[in-house]
Amino acid sequence: MEKGIIQVYYGNGSGKSSAAFGNAIRQVSSGSTAYIIRFLKGQIDEEYMRKLEPEVKLFSFERSVGGFDSLSESEKADEKQNILNGINFAKKVLSTGECDVLVLDEVLGIVDEGIATAEEILDVLRERSVFTTVILTGRSLPEQIRAVADQVLRIDSEKEPEVSE
């Protein structure tokens, strides 16, 4: 078995999730299995990802349709528990070795939002086998997580399309 790594895609540019998903799909094409756990994005329809099952399994624990940013404060309070359930699921997946690649999409954002601490994310990562690759995404990267990452990729946009109002 090949040794896994901890990889991070972060920055203000778009494409972090796409890069993480692409990396997972590339590894699946070599015989690996992948789980993707999405955070802060609500229940966005990802039917195209469902077509990759059973090798790639997609999970979202949030119940709201819209992203976390669009919720009221009371809705955010309710949704926080669902997000923490997703973190606990990630920890279980890593401790049992259920997959070869685990993508924690926008997990760094839950640290930004104060839902979990960097130390709690590190606790999840400590459950990983040396053969499991974990890919984290988000806008900012806490130094504690940077220190344990094997590969860090910063994604920033040089030019974005104009948005008409």
Image: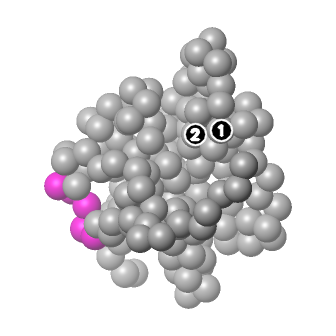
Query: Which amino acid type corresponds to the residue marked 1 in the rendered image?
Result: Gly
Residue range (magenta): 147-151
Label 1 – label 2 distance at C-alpha: 6 Å
Residue that badge 2 annotates:
40
Can residue 100 be seen here? no
Spot occupied by residue 56 in the image (x, y as percentages of width and height): 66, 67
Circle 2: residue type:
Leu
Q: In terms of depth relative to the viewer, which is nearer, 104 or 97?
A: 104
Who's the residue at 38% across and 36% down the image? 111
Residue 33 is tagged as none
Q: Local crowd at mark 1 within 10 Å, few (<14), some, or many (≥20)?
A: some
Above or below for 104 versus 18: above
Question: Mark 1 touching mark 2, by CB under 8 A?
Answer: yes
Quadrant in the picture for the N terminus: bottom left
**SS at mark 1 in the image:** loop
Residue 132 x, y percent position in the rendering: 41, 66
Q: Residue at x 67, y 71 (%)?
A: 55
Q: Is residue 38 shown to the viewer in this render?
A: yes
Q: Which residue is mark 1?
A: 67
Determine the residue located farthest toward the front in the rendered image.
165
Q: Please provide percent x and percent y for residue 43.
A: 74, 42
Q: Residue at x 59, y 48 (%)?
A: 38
Name the element at disc 2. Answer: loop
